[in-house]
Amino acid sequence: MDAVRVALLREVLAGTEWIAATRRFAGSLRSAVAPHGGGLLLVGSAGYEPWHLAAHLDDEAAWSGLPELSPTLVRHRVPAGAPPHLAVGPGRLAAAGRGATLLVVTPERPDAGLLERVHDARRNGATVLALDSGDRDLHTLAHDALTTAPPPLGTATRHAPEPAPDLTPDANPGLPLNLPPGLDPAPLLDLDTVQHLVSAAAGENSRPAPRHHRRFRDRLARLAEGLAAPPPPRW
């Protein structure tokens, strides 16, 4: 989803609290990552890798002049021959301590092993954020969390293609748990859609970027936030 479609999605959602909720969560993310901290670690569940969010955050880090937003994607299984930036295994979480930020993104219930690693990271001083479908155990460990609609029963999440957002009232059952009071319960957004809103908001309202980045961002704002195509991702 490019910046133009994010802008259109925001227009559709203007009557709900989703825009404020995703910007609030993005603000928590920006506050947690420090220029000289322990870095941003992005991890999913055993069956879901948030590689798409990793790519978008990497782009936002470059465009906004906030290199600390560029994440390290932690993978439960690293395939042979993976490039170095996609070859970081779960052992990396053991080194997460004070100054580090751990962002857990998954539509599935985290298994006991992941929850234990998240618990250890928090105990060692890391800031824990969660973007998920409302797992209570994970939210107990998180300093901040944003809940999306749960995936339909029987949906395979591993390597699933990105769906187009379904904004009809009955598209997703259940209520989001961590949105501000007064949320219009329709539409309920899936995890992929909310990731786009969060990553786009993460690069907003940041400290002044280098001049060439400011010019680029200004063009995006004037031309519906993105009539110019974004640069190819490195993921």
Image (spheres, rainbow, N blue to C red):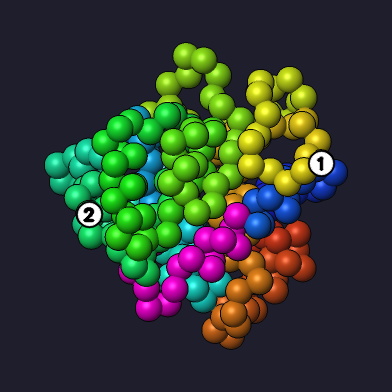
**Left or right side of 124 for 23:** right
Q: Is residue 200 visible?
A: no
Q: Is residue 151 above or below residue 221?
A: above
Q: Secondary structure at mark 1?
A: loop
Label 2 neighbour load within 10 Å: few <14, some 14-19, many 20+: few
Q: Residue at x 22, y 54 (%)?
A: 94
Name, please, the residue furthest toward the top.
Answer: 154
- The residue at the point 44 percent across, 73 percent down is 34
Tell me what residue is drawn at x 56 percent, y 72 percent.
64
Q: Which residue is mark 2?
A: 94
Q: Residue at x 54, y 68 (%)?
A: 31
Q: Which residues are magenta?
A: 25-41
Tag on residue 182? 1
Please state which amino acid type lies under the numbered disc 2. Answer: Ala
The amino acid marked with disc number 1 is Gly
Precedes in sequence: disc 2 or disc 1: 2
Q: 108 left or right of 221?
A: left
Is residue 71 found left or right of 170 in the rendered image? left
Is residue 79 a member of the stretch shown in magenta?
no
